[in-house]
Amino acid sequence: MFPFSKPRFSNHLFINTAIIFALNFFPALNNKANAESVLQILPTRVVLEKQRSMTVTLVNRGDDEGNYRLFMRNIRAEDNGKFREITEQDEILDGELFSDKMIRFSPRRVTVPARSKQQVRIVLRKPKDLATGEYRSHLVFRKLPKQESVLDDNDSEMDFTLKPIVEVTIPVIVRHGELEAKATIDNIALITDADNKQHIELNLHRQGNRSLYGDLDIWWTAANAKKQRVAYAKGLAVYVPNNSRKITISPLPEFTLSEQGTLQVEFTEDAAYGGNETATASKSW
């Protein structure tokens, strides 16, 4: 994990450049990819539990028209928060369930004018014999390249240019039956790296048959001092079937933690996505 003052772990939303880069959350983007990455998706995750449909909005924040192709992809979340695409060679893990076969969306190709938006409707079609569980696949919005000639007017030779593939991806989660989850936190540690920068490490554990998604707040109380919030992360998930996630986060730039004190970590689920679980743990030195 890299240090930043206002971290957002959107484990569900990432931009992929390549031909195609491994699904990392977030992969390092080159300048050109950053320039072309002007698509915003709202909301950044879809959870279908009681409702059977939802509308997502594509917002083109750029100055040029954008053309996008939509398709589903199955993605595995690692215990360090990174993502990678599941291939035909991968063995499916116990409890790993996918929603792609029961999701319909329209349109499948979208043109969004500059500084404008377009809606996509997502519809759930559950099979009658669907087993209880949480099913997750990801909806991919891939930007289509402009149709340009590969021949230069002043040169008869072919000129090939490698262009990045720009994608925005959001999870589409289907919950069926009675589901529950419990969160716990342990292994809190304060470390200093080779560059003399401080990091807070911890493990967030998940029990039950649905994922966790919420915010993390970290408080520090030094000896004879008041309690202060020194770090936080929004949009942090532990997806089924993972039982835990390793988290490393840096204190906000204005804080340097002393060798003696107490770290208190609080996790609160985002109620907008069907959860109200909380967890708290602390460590003193």
Image (cartoon, rainbow, N blue to C red):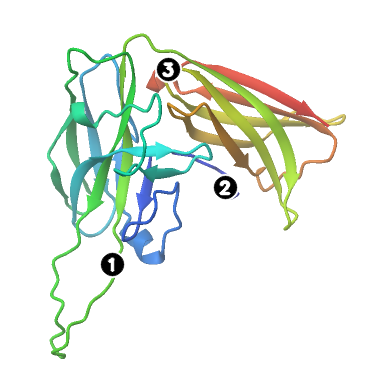
In which quadrant will I find the C terminus?
A: top right
Mark 2: which secondary structure?
Answer: loop
Q: Amino acid at mark 2?
A: Met
Apparent side of residue 147 relative to residue 202 in the rendered image (left or right):
left
Give the answer, above or below, for where 245 lies relative to 153: above
Give the answer, above or below, for where 197 lies relative to 226: below
| Residue topped by disc 3 | 209
Q: Amino acid at mark 3?
A: Asn
**Do callouts 2 and 3 mark residues in contact (Cβ within 8 Å)?**
no
Q: Amino acid at mark 1?
A: Lys
Q: Residues within 10 Å of mark 2 (few under 14, many from 20)?
A: some
Q: Position of residue 141 (x, y in %)?
A: 25, 46
Q: Which mark is residue 1?
A: 2
Residue 51 occupies which quadrant of the picture? top left
Mark 3: which secondary structure?
Answer: loop
Which of the two labelled residues, at mark 1 and mark 3, occupies the earlier sequence position?
A: 1
What residue do we see at 56% from left, 18% from top? 278
**Do callouts 1 and 2 mark residues in contact (Cβ within 8 Å)?**
no
What residue do we see at 16% from left, 77% from top? 150
Mark 1: which secondary structure?
Answer: loop
Q: CA distance from mark 2 to mark 3?
A: 27 Å
Which of the two labelled residues, at mark 1 and mark 2, occupies the earlier sequence position?
A: 2
| Residue topped by disc 1 | 163
Which of the two labelled residues, at mark 2 and mark 3, occupies the earlier sequence position?
A: 2
Apparent side of residue 83 relative to residue 234 in the rendered image (left or right):
left
Q: How many marks?
A: 3
Q: Position of residue 282 (x, y in %)?
A: 72, 25
Residue 120 occupies which quadrant of the picture? top left
- 2 vs 3, front mark: 3
Outermost residue toward the right in this view: 224
